């Protein structure tokens, strides 16, 4: 544990510098605060507005499909529920699912990459050809196929996304791990007869985790979009769960009369994904040595 | 270089095989009772038993896999649960409209994306560059299905300029009897020279094509920009500039030409993205293509159809990427 | 120059896009033939997936009822039969022997003349294959050809054969020549009927084009359509717009909101018609605590009938009274109706020893059905108020059904929502299929079994062909048992709302043939 702490401390310092660098670009700065705000929303909103009371029980069909007003800033849906509340509550669902999906992908991808890089040779070949195969599918396609076979639910959508996402992390960690292997402290650990799995867990993984975390945070936007897409196809969240993609999907039957029903949940997806992607783009810029000095 | 191409081809074959293995797992190993799933729930025990034998599910896994593979080679993807038709025939029906759409939107992507990326690179860190960055990140952050609805609201509902959906007015098609030369409706209508039909088909195609082009426009602009920036800092460009060669010529002739490798890769990549994005968009536009087909298959859990489309799309994507890599390798400027 | 070039490119692009806009059709191209009168039916699902008239038991009736004909056609408003391929028929006193006189001068689309042999062949083929709705012919013991234009049915038990012969499913008469065709002839998309239209073109699951059959026995004098397009347009908003703009002539299954918006639009006509479709929620009576009558009654009192009728169906429905829908014979107008009463529901639950927040139920419905989804969400809201948690799961029909047939009752859903409509115009069509004891599960989604009930409805069916009033009383008595024991919630009897273009004329809906447009009767005016 101590070891992990030691190896992570300098990274945190580096992170602080990076955040400072990030905020120098105006667009990135906005994105940075927006992401913080969205994360805050996703924690607070479900406490202020319990979903049971504010979505499931709040059907009020005599006020269906009302346009935006002071009472209902985003209008109401086809059963008279407040779209503003539904969209707000959707933040939690999207962020939570996206973070879990990326988390699972990391759990699968990181050890595999560390092993591939550390052992090299045959094991490396096998693992990396495996990632090549998974990356052979166009993005989203594998997620659709897996989700369809697992059956439609938000949880299965999450698993499907993890299954199609892990190879990216394997690739990054492998690259790190190949160079770490040659470092003195790893060689030393090897020399005193530390078992391979311990070296991987104690030295390789902690020291290669930083770039992969950066990559993962850049991916969140794409994952949120994928979740919304799966829900839109009917392979994710089920009604009446206030998931954005599902809301847009349901709105298809009403949108010509009630534009607000499609527009607001869609905007929520767009703004959230954009915030994460701009932040990711900013990260890439400052971490790329070619552009950094600018 | 030859070694590289051989290696790349070999990898392509491995990936293709791997994709086949994965779909095999999806279809045969994950489900608890694949035979029942294959024939659909309305089936009798007798039919399930028959399917068990037909699919070879009573055989060891490796024999099943061999059979799966030979079926694939013969072009046999099984039968759709919904329509009871061979999947291959269905794909043949639904592919042409999708291919037309993908080509059209890729065309738009090149037409808009490359100039955008080029100008953005030229004016790095100027207003246009910031706009370009925002636009390209924005384009890949947009939920395509939402854009489709949004465009329908504007161009159909508010302005009443373009049709809501479909590929052609069905009555026009019956009245004018467009001959089926190629199976591609737009191409056929062009050949027929009937302006009413050409216009109708074109108008129907616009909204879905624009919707689908947004993502590749962002991608192409972005990649062109970063490739150009890299090239512009190379010595030979600096040399060309110092010789006083016109800046436009430097940009368009030398720099862009040298960044074509990247562009080709991006186009291959974005074609794959666009193909999958049709899954989200075609149904909204009532476009009779593979996208609508798989969206319907997903809703009714038509597993053989899902597998068929998955295999087809993955193969297309892999082969496109393979071509892109080989074209780049053949480029003498690239040192492998 | 570069700037100019990019501006130029942008302008070219914008112009080329704008060129596609605008509605002027000033071109001098002329159609390749004389103008055709084409009718376009925008349908919400696959128009047909099975071309075999003996087997087809789903959407395909909208096609096959235009390409094939039956002996009789039933009109529920007058309770009379139109003589189609039969010119007359009589039954024996005990209802065991039925004799049909057949129409002369009718030919099938393949040129074969229509005779008594064709009738015998068609029905025997349907019985032999034994799929789809073939069970409607179960009472038939033998079919005798008396002469070319007379056919006799001998039954093994009394049954209303006129109602059976007018069924929208499995009662089609087909050309006997098909027995020599290859076995996949139907699968490939072919037909051999006597109907007014024959098949011109078919892309499976998407679009069907019919063209008029020149030798149709009623002839083509007067106004009719030359060709019919029936096309799948799943997107509700697209269907609405197509009819509004006159591209399509007729459609259905629009949202109540769309119908509201179209009401004052002169370019369309709206027909609100009774349908024989009702929406029913079945309780899993084999699973605790739903095996307790009190619990089922409690859940019946927790259902928001009025909101569902008003908002899920947009008012185009009425709350059901028993299992038989409005306008159909056998409906018990004086039977008890449950209504929303949460206090009573709570009390009944307590009586059965069920605590707050203890009961969790799973409801399944068919994905894509907006009315079912809305009903389920409204129900969930009410149940949540009395401490019952309802999970709603949208499933493709096939999966919903598969789950309902799981061998273990615990693995099945708790509540199953579905529509039902009749295969023959007889109350038995609901009561037998939905509530009669089943050896293996088919459509009895309550898994309900009551011997007394079974006897009543069997007797009712036998009496239907002989004494319809007595039959009606028996069916109503049987339904009162269903209401007491509450194996299901009878939610609402739907109305069908058809929207047609203003020039589409002659349309008259017959609810015994759900979603069918008999195109021969329609014309453009």
Image: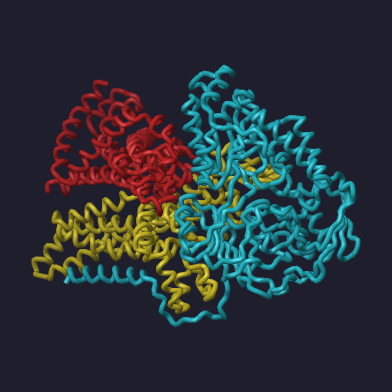
Chain colours: A red, B yellow, C cyan
Residue C469 sits above or below residue B285 on the image: above
Residue B251 sits above or below residue A172 on the image: below
Residue C81 sits above or below residue A260 on the image: below
Whether residue A126 is visible here, answered yes or no, is no
- Can you give x and y, in whole percent of width and height, for residue C219 in the image? 71, 73
Whether residue B119 is visible here, answered yes or no, is yes
Query: Does residue C156 appear left or right of residue B302 in this picture?
Result: right
- Can you give x and y, in whole percent of width and height, for residue A158 in the image? 41, 37
Q: Nearer the viewer, residue B182 or C273?
A: C273
Residue at 34% over, 59% down: B154
Q: Which quarter of the figure has residue C36? A: bottom right
Residue at 36% over, 69% down: C21
Query: Does residue B218 appear left or right of residue C84 in this picture?
Result: left
User: How many numbered circles are shown?
Assistant: 0
Q: Nearer the viewer, residue A294 or C345?
A: C345
Q: Nearer the viewer, residue C244 or A7?
A: C244
Q: Which quarter of the figure has residue C297? A: top right
Farthest front residue in view: C334
- Can you give x and y, in whole percent of width and height, for residue C180 in the image? 78, 64
- Can you give x and y, in whole percent of width and height, for residue A2 in the image? 24, 21
Query: Does residue B160 appear left or right of residue C75 in this picture?
Result: left
Where, quadrant-wise, is the C terminus of chain C in this rendering? bottom right
Q: Nearer the viewer, residue C158 or A19?
A: C158
Residue at 61% over, 45% down: B38
Residue at 28% over, 63% down: B112
Where, quadrant-wise, is the N terminus of chain C in this rendering? bottom left
């Amino acid at each position: 544990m101590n070891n992990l702490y030691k190896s992570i401390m300098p990274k945190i310092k580096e992170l602080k510098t990076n955040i400072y660098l990030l905020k120098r670009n105006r667009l990135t700065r906005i994105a940075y605060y927006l992401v913080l705000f969205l994360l805050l929303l996703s924690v607070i909103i479900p406490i202020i507005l319990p979903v049971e009371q504010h979505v499931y029980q709040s059907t009020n069909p005599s006020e269906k499909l009302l346009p935006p007003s002071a009472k209902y800033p985003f209008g109401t849906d086809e059963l008279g529920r407040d779209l503003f509340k539904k969209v707000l509550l959707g933040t939690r669902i999207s962020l939570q699912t996206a973070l879990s999906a990326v988390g699972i992908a990391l759990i699968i991808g990181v050890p595999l990459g560390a092993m591939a890089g550390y052992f090299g040779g045959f094991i490396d070949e096998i693992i990396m050809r495996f990632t090549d195969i998974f990356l052979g599918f166009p993005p989203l396609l594998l997620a659709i196929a897996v989700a369809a076979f697992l059956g439609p639910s938000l949880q299965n959508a999450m698993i499907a996304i993890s299954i199609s996402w892990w190879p990216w992390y394997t690739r990054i960690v492998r690259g790190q791990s190949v160079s770490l292997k040659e470092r003195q402290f790893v060689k030393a650990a090897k020399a005193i007869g530390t078992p391979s799995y311990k070296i991987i867990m104690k030295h390789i993984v902690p020291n290669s985790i930083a770039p992969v975390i950066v990559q993962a945070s850049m991916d969140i936007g794409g994952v949120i979009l994928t979740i919304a897409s799966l829900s839109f196809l009917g392979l994710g969240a089920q009604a009446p769960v206030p998931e954005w993609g599902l809301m847009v999907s349901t709105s298809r039957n009403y949108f010509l009369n009630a534009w607000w029903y499609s527009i607001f949940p869609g905007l929520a997806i767009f703004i959230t994904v954009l915030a994460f992607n701009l932040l990711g783009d900013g990260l890439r810029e400052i971490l790329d040595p070619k552009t950094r000095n600018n | 270089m030859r070694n590289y191409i051989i290696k790349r081809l070999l990898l392509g074959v491995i990936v293709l095989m791997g994709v086949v293995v994965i779909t095999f797992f999806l279809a045969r190993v994950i489900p608890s009772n694949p035979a029942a799933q294959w024939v659909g729930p309305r089936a009798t025990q007798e039919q399930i038993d028959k399917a068990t034998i037909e699919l070879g599910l009573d055989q060891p896994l490796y024999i099943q896999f061999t059979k799966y593979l030979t079926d694939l080679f013969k072009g046999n993807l099984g039968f759709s649960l919904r329509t009871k038709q061979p999947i291959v025939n269905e794909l043949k029906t639904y592919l042409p409209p999708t291919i037309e759409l993908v080509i059209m939107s890729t065309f738009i992507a090149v037409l808009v994306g490359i100039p955008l990326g080029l100008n953005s690179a030229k004016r790095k860190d100027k207003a246009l560059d910031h706009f370009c960055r925002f636009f390209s990140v924005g384009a890949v952050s947009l939920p395509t299905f939402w854009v489709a609805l949004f465009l329908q609201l504007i161009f159909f509902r508010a302005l009443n300029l373009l049709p809501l959906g479909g590929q052609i007015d069905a009555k026009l098609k019956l009245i004018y009897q467009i001959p089926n030369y190629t199976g591609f409706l737009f191409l056929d209508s062009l050949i027929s020279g009937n302006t009413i039909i050409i216009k109708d088909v074109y108008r129907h195609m616009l909204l879905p094509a624009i919707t689908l082009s947004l993502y590749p426009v962002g991608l192409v602009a972005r990649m062109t920009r970063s490739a150009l920036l890299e090239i512009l800092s190379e010595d030979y460009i600096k040399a060309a500039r110092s010789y006083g060669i016109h800046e436009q010529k430097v940009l368009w002739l030398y720099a862009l030409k040298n960044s074509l490798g990247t562009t080709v890769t991006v186009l291959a990549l974005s074609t794959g993205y666009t193909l999958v994005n049709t899954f989200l968009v075609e149904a909204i536009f009532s476009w009779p293509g593979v996208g609508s087909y798989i969206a319907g298959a997903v809703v009714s859990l038509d597993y053989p159809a899902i597998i068929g489309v998955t295999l087809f799309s993955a193969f297309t994507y892999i082969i496109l990427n393979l071509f892109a890599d080989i074209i780049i390798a053949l480029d003498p400027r690239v040192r492998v | 120059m570069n700037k100019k070039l990019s501006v130029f490119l942008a302008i070219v692009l914008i112009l080329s896009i704008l060129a596609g806009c605008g509605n002027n059709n000033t071109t001098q191209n002329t159609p390749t033939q004389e103008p055709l009168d084409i009718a376009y039916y925008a349908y919400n699902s696959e128009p047909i997936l099975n071309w075999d008239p003996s087997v087809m038991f789903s959407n395909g009736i909208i096609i096959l009822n235009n390409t094939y004909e039956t002996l009789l056609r039933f009109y529920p408003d007058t309770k009379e039969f139109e003589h189609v391929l039969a010119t007359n028929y009589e039954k024996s006193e005990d209802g065991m022997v039925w004799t049909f006189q057949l129409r002369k001068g009718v030919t099938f689309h393949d040129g074969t003349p229509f005779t008594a042999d064709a009738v015998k062949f068609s029905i025997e083929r349907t019985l032999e294959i034994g799929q789809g709705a073939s069970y409607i012919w179960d009472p038939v013991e033998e079919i005798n050809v008396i002469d070319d234009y007379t056919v006799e049915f001998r039954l093994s038990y009394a049954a209303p054969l006129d109602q059976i012969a007018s069924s929208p499913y499995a009662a089609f008469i087909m050309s006997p020549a098909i027995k020599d065709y290859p076995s996949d002839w139907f699968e490939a998309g072919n037909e051999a009927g006597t109907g007014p239209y024959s098949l011109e073109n078919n892309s499976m699951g998407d679009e069907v084009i019919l063209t008029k059959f020149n030798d149709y026995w009623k002839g083509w004098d007067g106004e009719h359509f030359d060709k019919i397009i029936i096309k799948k347009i799943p997107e509700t908003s697209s269907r609405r717009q197509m009819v509004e703009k006159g591209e399509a002539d007729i459609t259905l299954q629009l949202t109540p909101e769309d119908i509201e918006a179209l009401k004052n639009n002169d370019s369309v006509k709206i027909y609100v018609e009774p349908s024989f479709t009702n929406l029913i929620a079945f309780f899993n009576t084999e699973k605790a605590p739903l095996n307790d009558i009190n619990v089922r009654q409690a859940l019946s009192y927790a259902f928001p009938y009025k909101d569902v009728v008003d908002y899920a169906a947009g008012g185009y429905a009425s709350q059901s009274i028993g299992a038989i829908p409005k306008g159909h014979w056998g409906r018990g107008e004086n039977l008890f109706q449950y209504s929303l009463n949460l206090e009573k529901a709570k009390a009944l639950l307590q009586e059965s020893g069920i605590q707050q927040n203890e009961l969790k139920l799973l409801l399944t419905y068919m994905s894509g059905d907006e009315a079912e989804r809305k009903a389920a969400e409204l129900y969930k809201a009410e149940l949540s108020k009395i401490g019952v948690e309802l999970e709603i799961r949208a499933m493709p029909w096939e999966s919903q059904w598969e789950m309902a047939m799981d061998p273990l009752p615990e693995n099945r859903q708790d509540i199953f929502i579905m529509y039902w409509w009749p295969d023959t115009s007889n109350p038995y069509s609901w009561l037998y299929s939905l509530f009669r004891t089943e050896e293996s599960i088919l459509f009895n989604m309550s898994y309900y079994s009551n011997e007394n009930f079974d006897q009543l409805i069997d007797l009712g069916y036998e009496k239907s062909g002989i004494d319809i009033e007595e039959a009606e009383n028996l069916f109503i008595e049987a339904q009162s048992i269903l209401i007491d024991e509450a194996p299901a919630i009878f939610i609402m009897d739907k109305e069908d709302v058809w929207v047609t273009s203003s020039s589409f004329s002659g349309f008259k809906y017959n609810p015994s043939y759900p979603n069918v447009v008999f195109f021969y009767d329609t014309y453009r005016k």
